[in-house]
């Protein structure tokens, strides 16, 4: 099995009659009817759904405002509150006693939280935030472990109209610092430490380190949830324990009714420059798509136990942990730990114990668990009762057909459809995905657009290509949950997503794609920009290069991706040192130091898997680094490209071998 082996399989998996019968969107005719409705009356279609699925405090009368394109607005004169939609409306409907969250800690301890409890906890924390002067529109950075409190913090921000910016707990102090400053953050919510795989990992001390880097005067409050009880310095007047924030606060907090376009959150993600971008999402449009995709792609029903394994630090953990399942009144798992602790049977044991019916994870996790199951029979999924499952999902990167088939057979028992959902931080929710009661599945293809989404494959000039040809993936019409802007940088928003090459009219996803000549099914061929996808996490090559060259030893660095069996892509860095190229043993030590340096600068996920040293990098006569040659070298491919424009062709031989 190899991740290099991407693309479509030729096997077809039509939905069973049983699945079709029970699905919310039942049968191809129902799917086509929705697509037709959207084609005939695009705004009418979204308006109907927004009225049916979202509770509005003040109904909207405008649907799509294109007057300042590409800064599109949806439902702009409507008012709502996202937290009200996720909590109050279920409690008001008599579902207060229903379990909203089943939290399983790293050590296996389980806590259940009902909708009524969750509403009370969110309201108390929201009141506590207000008491500390945090107001509508303020930016609040959340740096928390996977926890009930993490979800409470996000929901509480939504309740008072504060804009959260969740940063994954694996990011470094420097990354936290960058994000605090970029957003003009007024408060940070964190924990003393987090438990992951039996280890205690620091959080609060990372926040302290980031604040000490300077220029963070906007931060007035740091709220600290005690997770492990580990030592944790508290700065008087700034830092306050979570218990103190909620102490004495009532369990009722009137939601702050906000305009549909009020920003719900910022989420920083990598682009093709060194600077991460703060993707800004709206309240109304985002919520609508979170609800629709949870109901239609995941077919979530009242009795389901839903489990999305993503961390709240990524967009998947926003839409399919913190918002979508709650807005639909579902019961879901929140998991603190990692899939391989205490052993690689953890996911399967949890599915068995909690009778999970819908399971959503990333291909990287599947591939690493396949390896574990092959080598350690005790953690093979056949050792667990997985009969509660009825639907599986995949997200974050292309799933290779071999991993797909294994997932289908060994986890889904050959009876559960797999929804291979293509989407991005910027899209807010699923864009191209099978629907379980509709789509004949083809391993390796994300199949067809979600009803209402207008996706296409175009050439460099923006002209739609015939099916069967590979090209650039675009979205041809604005949709409700689309990115609204890049925080503080509207010009970059326009340039990155609505480039002039396409007359500012097409949303550029940054991925390549092709459509099957007969079915029109989409297959994503991977990023077409300088963004890598490591274990389903986005990393910009420039970000890693900037981190490397900030090391005093490094003169120059170029980073490329190469296929990896488990992580999909792996980071390979070519480095020129300020001193002479090191010999084998010393090179190993320096490479190790540089890896740790990158972990410190960005976070462990950005650590290069391989570092090769050279006297120089392959450059054109004008000094441009020829990355496509580096990509071939990293893959171990023979160089077949034209190298006549190279200034220094002899360097290729040197870089061929890992030093
Ligand atoms: O390259 C695509 C890949 O992940 C990128 C988006 O990354 P991010 O914003 O971090 O969001 C990940 C979770 C939604 C895309 O540009 N990607 C995501 N899902 C798939 C995928 N590639 C292939 N198949 C998918 N299902």
Image (cartoon, rainbow, N blue to C red):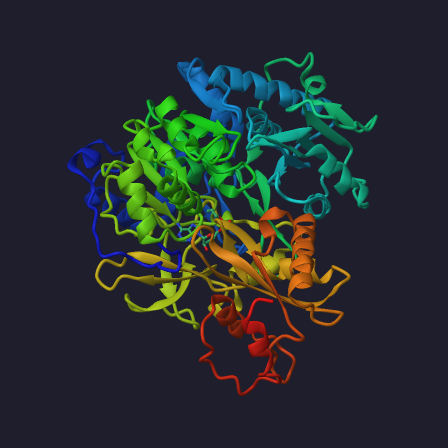
In this rendered view, identify the residue nearer to me: 61 or 5.
5
Q: Is residue 468 above or below residue 344?
A: below
The residue lying toward the viewer, choosing from 514 and 3, is: 3
Asked which quadrant contains residue 19, the reply is top left
Q: 495 or 536: nearer the eye?
A: 536
Residue 379 image-quadrant placement? top left
Please identify the residue farthest to the left as the structure is shown. 17
Vertical position of residue 396 compared to residue 458: above or below: above
Q: Residue 205: x, y in percent?
A: 74, 35
Location of residue 623 by image quarter: bottom right
Q: Is residue 293 above or below residue 134?
A: below
Q: Is residue 211 visible?
A: yes
| Residue at 69% over, 43% down | 176
Q: What percent of the width, then of the height, locates residue 112? A: 48, 17
Q: Position of residue 331 (x, y in %)?
A: 41, 24
- Seen at 67% across and 68% down, the residue is 583
Residue extending farthest to the bottom is 644
């Amino acid at each position: 099995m190899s991740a290099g082996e991407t693309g479509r399989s030729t096997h077809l998996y039509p939905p069973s009659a049983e699945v079709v019968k029970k699905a919310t969107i039942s049968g191809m005719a129902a799917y086509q009817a929705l697509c037709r409705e959207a084609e005939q009356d695009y705004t009418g279609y979204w308006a109907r759904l927004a009225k049916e699925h979202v509770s509005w405090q003040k109904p909207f009368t405008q649907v799509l405002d294109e007057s300042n394109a590409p800064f599109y607005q949806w439902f702009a004169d409507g008012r709502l509150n996202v937290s009200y939609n996720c909590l109050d409306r279920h409690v008001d409907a008599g579902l207060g006693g229903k379990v909203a969250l089943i939290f399983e800690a790293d050590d296996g301890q389980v806590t259940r939280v009902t909708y009524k409890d969750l509403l009370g906890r969110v309201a108390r924390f929201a009141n506590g935030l207000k008491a500390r002067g945090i107001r509508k529109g303020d930016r609040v950075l959340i740096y928390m472990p996977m926890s009930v409190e993490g979800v409470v913090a996000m929901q509480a921000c939504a309740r008072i109209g504060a804009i959260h910016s969740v940063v994954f707990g694996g990011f470094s102090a420097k990354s936290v610092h960058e994000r605090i400053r970029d957003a003009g953050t007024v408060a940070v919510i964190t924990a003393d430490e987090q438990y992951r795989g039996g280890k205690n990992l620091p959080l609060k001390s990372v926040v302290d380190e980031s604040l000490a880097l300077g220029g963070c005067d906007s931060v007035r409050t740091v709220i600290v949830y005690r997770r492990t009880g580990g030592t944790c310095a508290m700065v008087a007047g700034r830092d306050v324990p979570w218990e103190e924030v909620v102490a004495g606060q009532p369990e009722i907090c009137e939601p702050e009714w906000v305009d549909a376009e009020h920003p719900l959150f910022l989420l920083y993600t990598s682009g093709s420059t060194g600077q991460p971008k703060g993707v800004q999402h709206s309240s109304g449009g985002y919520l609508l798509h979170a609800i629709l995709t949870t109901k239609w792609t995941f077919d979530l029903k009242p009795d389901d136990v839903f489990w999305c394994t993503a961390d709240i630090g990524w967009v998947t953990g926003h839409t399919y942990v913190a918002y979508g399942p709650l807005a639909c009144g579902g019961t879901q798992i929140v998991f603190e730990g990692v899939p391989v602790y205490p052993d690689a049977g953890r996911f399967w044991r949890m599915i068995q114990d909690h009778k999970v019916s819908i399971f959503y994870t990333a291909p990287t996790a599947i591939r690493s668990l396949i390896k574990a199951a092959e080598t350690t029979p005790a953690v093979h999924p056949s050792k667990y009762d997985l009969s509660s499952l009825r639907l599986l999902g995949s997200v974050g990167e292309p799933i290779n057909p071999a991993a797909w088939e294994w997932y289908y057979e060994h986890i889904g028992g050959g009876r559960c459809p797999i929804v291979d959902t293509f989407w991005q931080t910027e899209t807010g929710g699923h864009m191209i995905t099978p629907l379980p009661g509709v789509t004949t599945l083809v391993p390796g293809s994300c199949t067809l657009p979600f009803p209402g989404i207008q996706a296409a494959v175009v050439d460099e000039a923006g002209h739609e290509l015939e099916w069967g040809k590979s090209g650039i993936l675009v979205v041809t019409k604005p949709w409700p949950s689309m990115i609204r802007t890049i925080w503080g940088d509207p010009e970059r928003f326009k340039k990155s997503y609505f480039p002039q090459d396409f007359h500012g009219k097409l949303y550029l996803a940054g991925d390549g794609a092709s459509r099957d000549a007969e079915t029109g099914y989409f297959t994503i061929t991977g990023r077409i920009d300088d963004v890598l996808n490591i274990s389903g996490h986005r990393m910009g090559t420039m970000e890693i290069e900037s981190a490397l060259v900030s090391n005093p030893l490094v003169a120059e660095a170029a980073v490329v991706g190469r296929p990896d069996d488990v992580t999909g892509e792996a980071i390979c860095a070519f480095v020129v040192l300020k001193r002479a190229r090191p010999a084998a043993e010393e090179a190993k030590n320096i490479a190790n130091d540089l890896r740790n340096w990158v972990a410190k600068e960005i976070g462990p996920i950005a650590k290069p898997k391989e570092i090769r040293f050279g006297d120089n990098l392959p450059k054109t006569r004008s000094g441009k680094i020829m990355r496509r040659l580096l990509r071939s070298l990293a893959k171990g491919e023979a160089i077949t490209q034209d190298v006549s424009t190279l200034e220094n062709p002899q360097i290729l031989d040197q870089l061929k071998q890992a030093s």
